[in-house]
Image: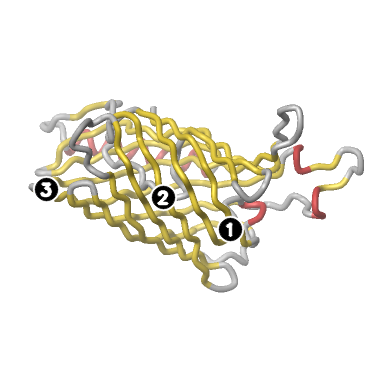
Amino acid sequence: MKIKLMKNYLLLFLFLIVQHNSAQKVIFFPSALNIKPFTANTLEANLGFQFKLNSNELLLNIGNSIDVLHFNCGNGNISVGADLFTWTLLRKEDNFHFPVDAVDYQFGINFGYINNWKSFSYGFRGRISHISAHFVDGHYEGVLKIWRDGLNPRVYSREFVELLPFIKYRGLRFYAGFTYLFNVDPSSIKKDNYQLGFDYYFKNRFTKYFTPYIGYDLRIVHLDEYSGNNSFVLGIKFGKVEGRGLSLQYNYYSGKSLHGEYFNYTEKFSSLGLKLDL
């Protein structure tokens, strides 16, 4: 029912856009995103993995975000798109085995606006999304017939609206915004989250196919009380900044777990990873 409702909203939004802007240039399925993902934000669609340095765990991310259409609106550009991705917790074992402990799914629609003025640009990205989380067979001790660490599967899901305004000067972008959970399970989780951060892609005067970058994201989550999730990224992208490429990066994270089944557990780790931009 929720998926059908989101689909109906998207179709209505697309219809109104096309009708209102029939005289403007409309591009369906453009080759690039209107709003580049926020580099250190942990809830972004990407394709890659991270090896944790202080444990035998690794993170595998599979998914993508696409823009369905772009159209001009005065001096700016508006986009409507879709997200579908997972982030998965695996353990490293002997003989190249990687049991899957937990997996989280996110899908939804996104919309954005950007206006460029001289060396500045500003705008926002909004999302309406669903997240659900699950333990997988790698969390189950088959011999003992119990769930690992005495943690049984529990229902975790959330539907939310997110809005992230930003301002950018050359390669430096600042953003701040909020998330409102209009439906969440367990119901004890509070409905307001807040976020701010930045990313910076260093201009390389020698070549445009080799770009160092840095990013930081602070997410204030509200469970029984407020707490902060810190995400720091330092990396190098091979390929055009706004296009396809391969990134090697170092990540540091501290705060509540990235995985819904562990939503009230605190974790801290560093990782080395690889990410593909398709």
Reading the chain from its start, which is encountered first: label 3 or label 1?
A: 3
Q: How far is disc 2 from disc 1 in space, using C-alphas?
A: 15 Å
Residue type at mark 3?
Answer: Ser
Q: Residue 119 shows which numbered tag? A: 3
Q: Residue at the far right: name it.
A: 144
Estimate how packed mark 3 is, as few (under 14), some (14 to 19) or many (20 or more) residues with alpha carbons within 10 Å.
Answer: few
Residue type at mark 2?
Answer: Ala
Q: How far is disc 3 from disc 1 in space, using C-alphas?
A: 37 Å
What residue is disc 1 on?
A: 268
- Label 1's element? strand
**Which residue does the image show at 62% across and 67% down from the upper left?**
188
**Which residue does the image show at 29% across and 42% down from the upper left?**
35
**Closest to the observer: 114 or 278?**
278
Q: Residue 40 shows which numbered tag? A: 2
**Closest to the observer: 87 or 8?**
87
**Closest to the observer: 154 or 7?**
154
Mark closer to the observer (3, 1): 1
Rendering quarter of residue 138? top right
Where in the figure is residue 253, as x and y percent of width and height?
52, 55
Residue type at mark 1?
Answer: Lys
Estimate how packed mark 1 is, as few (under 14), some (14 to 19) or many (20 or more) residues with alpha carbons within 10 Å.
Answer: some
